[in-house]
Image (tube, rainbow, N blue to C red):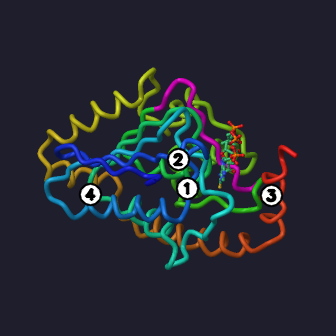
Amino acid sequence: MADVDTLIEGPVLTLVINRPDKKNSLTSAMYQTLSDGLQTLQERDDLRVGVLRGSGPDFCAGNDLFDFAAPGDPEAPVTSFLRGLAEAAKPLVAAVNGRAVGVGATMLLHCDVVHLSTDAELRFPFVDLGLVPEAGSTLLLPQLAGRRRAASALLLGRPVPAADALWWGMATDVNDDPDAAASASAAALAAKPPQALAATKRLLWGDRTSLLQQMSVEGSVFAKLLAGDEFAAATERFRSRRS
Ligand code: COA
């Protein structure tokens, strides 16, 4: 069974994270499908907009804690997925229901339009896991929200409820039906003149060299910590939390 569904409807390519029994946590195979989807979006002229969604009540519980590769490892599908997000030339829209944890939250920082459900909550528990944040979030989150708020989310690991995420500039809006809102945003974007749209996205993001550099630095620290005692202890705590 595919744990990520790639749907193409007219000019819109939608990637649905579809592993609800594991809270849509992401395995290497799933990153590969997500990365392939972003590449298809990039390559096909008839596709104008990418949409990210999760299946079930929660958007994504982050990386599968038992199938972890360091972002930045050139062989790892997570690396090509994150790079695909960071280099996306076409607009990306996200529909977020419920919890978005770890990479489930950091991937949203690369999206141009983010619709959150009223019960959505973003969590960045990297430090508690003995890791560092990835996906350029140590650069993108302070840019969006300010360093003080970024420290609350990234150092203290405080969950960010939807209303705060909106106030902090991490979301476009909060509403009862983020899936419908994402479909409407995608349709609106797809109807716009594509060259002007792509040029405006390029201008909005500017030169992404420093973002890619930050992702690479995060990746090397992450790799070191992934092999360390603090991460091993955190995964053991998660594994044994119900026993
Ligand atoms: N990796 C692997 N499995 C995960 C997972 C993850 N990141 N997140 C959830 N799951 C699995 C659980 O092990 C459980 O599987 P089981 O039914 O076979 O035991 C199932 O998904 C449901 O999770 P559960 O914890 O029972 O759901 P919940 O509603 O009580 O809590 C979360 C949901 C997301 C808050 C909680 O699962 C969690 O904290 N997950 C880890 C998040 C995380 O640290 N991600 C990595 C960030 S870098």
Q: Which residue is mark 1?
A: 26
Badge 4 local density, few (<14 within 10 Å), some, or many (20+)? many
Q: Residue furthest right?
A: 243
Q: Which residue is mark 2?
A: 19
Q: Which residue is mark 3?
A: 234
Region rendered in magenta: 116-127
- Residue at image position (57%, 26%) is 119
**Residue labelled 1 has its Cβ within 8 Å of some atom of ligand 1:** yes
First reached walking from the N terminus: tag 2 or tag 3: 2
Q: Is mark 3 within 8 Å of ligand 1?
A: yes
**Which amino acid type is shown beneath numbered disc 2?**
Arg
Q: Nearer the viewer, mark 1 or mark 4?
A: 1
Amino acid carrying mark 1 in the image = Leu
Marks 1/4: CA distance?
20 Å
Q: Which mark is residue 41?
A: 4
Disc with the residue nearer the chain's start (4 vs 2) = 2
Q: Are marks 4 and 2 in contact (CB under 8 Å)?
A: no
Name the N-terminal-most of marks 4 and 3.
Answer: 4
